[in-house]
Amino acid sequence: VVERPASVVKELVENCFDAGATQVMVDVEQGGARLIKIRDNGCGIDKEDLPLALSRHATSKINSLQDLEQVATMGFRGEALPSISSVSRLSLISRREGVSCAWRVQADGSEEDLDPQPDPHPLGTTLEVCDLFYNTPARRKFLKSAKTEFGHIETLLKRMALSRFDVAFELKHNQREIFNFKIADTQEQQEQRIAHIFGSAFLDNSVLIDFSASGMRLHGWVGLPTFSRSQQDMQYFYVNGRLIKDRLVTHAIKQAYQDVLFHGRHSVYVLYLELDPSLVDVNAHPQKLEVRFREGRTVHDFLFKALHRSLADVRPQTQVSEPVAESEA
Ligand code: ADP
Ligand code: MG
């Protein structure tokens, strides 16, 4: 749904991933209402495909403001770019490998300017979304302050950054750099990225786990019971690379922490569950981030056991974390 600037960013960054990009740069102005600019180094789009990428909801379909409001609310259904272009002034610039130059198309609602023009853009794609909802006043009115809207974008991008350590991410707001994550191949680099997002205290107070059983793998960082929070703001759980929020998962984790956490406190974790994609439906409720596991109880048991064991392993000694390596040397 083109609900707010962050939902635009989500669709566009997913397109960058789809294009095999290893670098994603996001420039935002005024919380995204003024500008959302996303550049990647992915495979690019052929010149002749550029107009097509934008024009599925072409003007013939949209005759009134009311239609536009509908486009904005009904969701993308695999038509992110046309939906976004119908509620913004959008330009798309792309260069494919082996092609002599990049090409640009623009769509400001008139749809008359889809004739590609040459552009000096390097390999990859840039999408510029200007003046979001300029033609849908009802939607525009629902936007919160620039600070709030940008906050949503920042949170979203951090979550995405933790799902793809093999991609570099850069975020700017009003020309100010917010973060710049390099590709993180090693554990050390990955922990640097995590420390940037959650603060280094998270890493000082968590353990790296890696568990496999029943065809599933659970790995990532789980906080020690002594490092709990009053809010659930440091709980990131990914299923096959996709951030989810699921009752079954939350319940299994809660249960594993039950005996070691004070009442009303919340555990912290960044966890990745990998399992056969046919055993999970990630599109059950895309907006709510819910998933549906085919064998829910097996997943629940696996998560509980993996975490329960990890916590049991660390509980006795790790109240004080000494650097072990030094004394052994
Ligand atoms: P979908 O992603 O569901 O195919 P979109 O509207 O998001 O629909 O994108 C339309 C098409 O435009 C994509 O299928 C892809 O071919 C192309 N495209 C969009 N963004 C990019 C990008 N960053 N890099 C390469 N191709 C892109
Ligand atoms: Mg898409």
Image: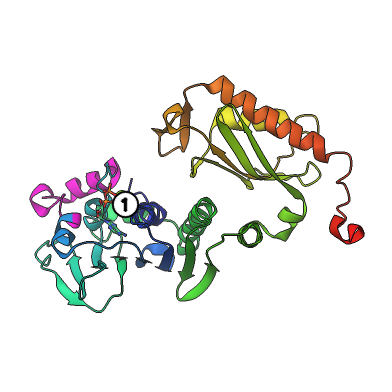
Tally of numbered discs: 1
Q: Label 1 sits on what residue type?
A: Arg
Magenta range is 53-75
Residue 5 percent across, percent down from the top left: 38, 57
Q: Nearer the viewer, residue 74 or 117?
A: 117
Q: Nearer the viewer, residue 129 or 180?
A: 180
Residue 70 shown in magenta: yes
Q: Quadrant of residue 203?
A: bottom right
Q: Quadrant of the C terminus?
A: bottom right
Residue 16 percent across, percent down from the top left: 36, 58
Residue 19 shown in magenta: no
Can I make out residue 140 in this image?
yes
| Up-down relation of residue 223 to residue 125 (above or below) | above
Residue 283 percent across, percent down from the top left: 39, 34
Secondary structure under badge 1? helix
Q: Residue at x 21, y 53 (%)?
A: 82
Please rate how many residues cluster around mark 1, counting C-alpha atoms within 10 Å: few if below 14, some from 14 to 19, many from 20.
some
- Residue bearing the label numbered 1: 139
Residue at the right extreme, as displayed:
327
Q: Residue at x 23, y 61 (%)?
A: 45
Q: Is residue 254 left or right of residue 132?
A: right
